[in-house]
Image (spheres, helix red, strand yellow):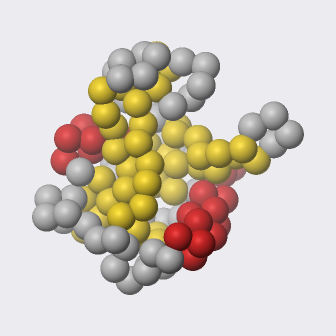
């Protein structure tokens, strides 16, 4: 299954839509990291997932993958593809991936309407 979604500005976040969304700031950072890692945008992409563990029960998992898996949902944002496996999609649908760069913190930020509780580190949640 493939879906094409509009790129969001961080100011216009709407985390209640179906699928997964990525802000322009996050896309810029993903492109830089993919180039550094030697990941081809035509074949590979960013894999978003959820796994058990962490402070609140579930942890976000983000990494690059050289190609999608058979049952992945594939989201295309201009030249960046995002892969989400079926189990993770249950927890990630409606989520917005943003990138934050401040004096205190630098990194990806998961804005997830399915999260009922999260910890201070921002990478763990429960639903």
Total marks drawn?
A: 0
Residue at the (54%, 18%) spot, across then down: 119
Q: Is residue 126 left or right of residue 110?
A: left
- Farthest residue to the right: give it: 103
Which percent across, then down, holds residue 118? 50, 20
Look at the image and tell me in which quarter the C terminus lies.
Answer: top left
Q: Identify which residue, 101 or 40, lies in the foreground.
A: 40
The answer to whether residue 78 is seen in the rendering is: no
Residue at the (34%, 44%) spot, across then down: 49
Task: Note whether 41 is above or below 117 in the view shown.
Answer: below
Residue 39 found in image quarter = bottom left
Q: Is residue 31 left or right of residue 112?
A: right
Residue at the (52%, 48%) spot, across then down: 97
Q: Identify which residue, 2 or 64, lies in the foreground.
A: 64
Which percent across, then down, holds residue 95? 43, 43
- Farthest residue to the left: give it: 70
Residue at the (36%, 64%) spot, across then down: 65
Task: Note whether 110 is above or below 20 in the view shown.
Answer: above
Task: Note whether 100 is above or below 42 in the view shown.
Answer: above
Which percent across, then down, holds residue 35? 57, 76
Which percent across, then down, holds residue 104? 81, 34
Q: Is residue 37 left or right of residue 126?
A: right
- Farthest residue to the front: give it: 37
């Amino acid at each position: 299954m493939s879906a094409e979604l509009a790129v969001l500005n961080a100011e216009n976040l709407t985390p209640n839509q179906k699928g997964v969304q990525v802000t322009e700031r996050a896309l810029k950072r993903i492109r830089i990291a993919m180039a550094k890692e030697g990941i081809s945008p035509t074949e590979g992409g960013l894999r978003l997932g959820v796994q058990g563990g962490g402070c609140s029960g579930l942890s976000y998992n983000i990494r690059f993958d050289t190609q999608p898996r058979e049952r992945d949902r594939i989201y295309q944002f201009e030249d960046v593809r995002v892969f989400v496996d079926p189990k993770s999609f249950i927890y990630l649908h409606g989520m917005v991936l943003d990138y934050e760069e401040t004096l205190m913190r630098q990194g990806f930020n998961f804005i997830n309407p399915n999260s009922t509780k999260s910890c201070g580190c921002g990478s763990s949640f429960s639903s």
